[in-house]
Structures are given as structure tokens and as C-alpha cells.
Image: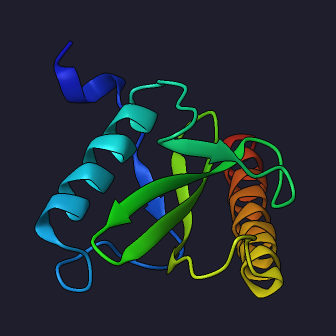
Amino acid sequence: MDETSSRKPLVWLEGEVKTPPFSAKARYEAGMLLRLLQEGESLSMPQAEPVPRVGQRCGALRIRDESHNWRIMYRIDRDAVIVVEVYDKKTRQIPEQVIQNCQKRLEHYDSIVETSRRSKSKGKGNG
């Protein structure tokens, strides 16, 4: 089994990590933290914080970059790491609009996944 086969895939619902606006150093840090999540590591402060207001298994990666405080909102699912939002944090608390957008994106994602699972299970019985 090779090294990548045990990594969960990343599913990007919104946002991106690129230079610019991220510095090369911050982009590298974001990539390393995402890789750790893919490999099943549990991250905590100061690299990550739980965000239960968004939902179960949700958190935010914390990346300090020159004059920016980036946050990468994510959820850990059984089969993937879902990236829900990438934003430049400018206030002490997560803006309510970010919370709501993340919740809506996850609801939409979950409904698509559930519909796909149902259609696959129906297809198996018709063979």
C-alpha cells in the first residue's frame, strides 16, 4: 500500500489556497495542515480550532500570513476532508455570514451525497 492510498481526498466546496493572496510560506503551511487532516491527524490550537456552530466534525485551520489571519473551514467525514470556506479573518469572532454559508454548503453537499448513495443502491438491486 503506497503512502497516498491511506489519505482521504479533499473535496473543495468553496475557496482556494493560492499565491497571491497567500504568501508561498502560508500556502505551504496550509497544504501541510490539510495533508495532516487527510492522514487522520487530530489538530488542535494553535493550528486548528473546533467550530461546532458550523456542524459536527467541523473546524478551522489557522494560518498566520504577514498581515493576514487566514481560516480554512473544514469538516472531517468518514471518506473525505471537506473544505467549506477559505477567508481572511478580520474580526475576533467568525462572521455570522461565514457560519451560515458553511452550513448551507454542507447541507447541499450532504443532500447530493445522499441522493447519489440512494441511486447507487437502487441500481444494485436491478442487476
Q: Can residue 127 be spotted in the picture?
A: no
Q: How far across and down, in percent of the image, does residue 122 sit?
A: 77, 50
Q: Residue at 40% across / 45% down in the picture? A: 9
Number of labels in the image equals: 0
Depicted 104 relative to depicted 46: above or below: below
Q: Is 43 positioned to the left or the right of 101 in the image?
A: left
Q: Is 102 positioned to the left or the right of 17 in the image?
A: right
Q: Is 95 positioned to the left or the right of 26 in the image?
A: right
Q: Nearer the viewer, residue 95 or 33?
A: 95
Depicted 6 relative to depicted 73: above or below: above
Q: Nearer the viewer, residue 100 or 123?
A: 100
Q: How far across and down, in percent of the image, does residue 27 sit?
A: 23, 63
Of all residues, the one furthest to the left in this rendering is 24
Depicted 69 relative to depicted 126: above or below: below
Of all residues, the one furthest to the right in this rendering is 53
Quadrant of the rendered structure where residue 94 is?
bottom right
Q: Is 121 positioned to the left or the right of 18 in the image?
A: right
Q: Residue at 35% across / 31% down in the picture? A: 7
Q: Residue at 76% across / 61% down in the picture? A: 110
Is the N terminus in the top left, top right, bottom left or bottom right quadrant?
top left
Q: Residue at 51% across / 40% down in the picture? A: 46
Q: How far across and down, in percent of the image, does residue 14 sit?
A: 51, 78
Quadrant of the rendered structure where residue 54 is?
bottom right
Q: Can residue 61 be spotted in the picture?
A: yes
Is the C terminus in the top left, top right, bottom left or bottom right quadrant?
top right
Q: Nearer the viewer, residue 29 or 111?
A: 29
Report the colour scheme.
rainbow
Of all residues, the one furthest to the top in this rendering is 1
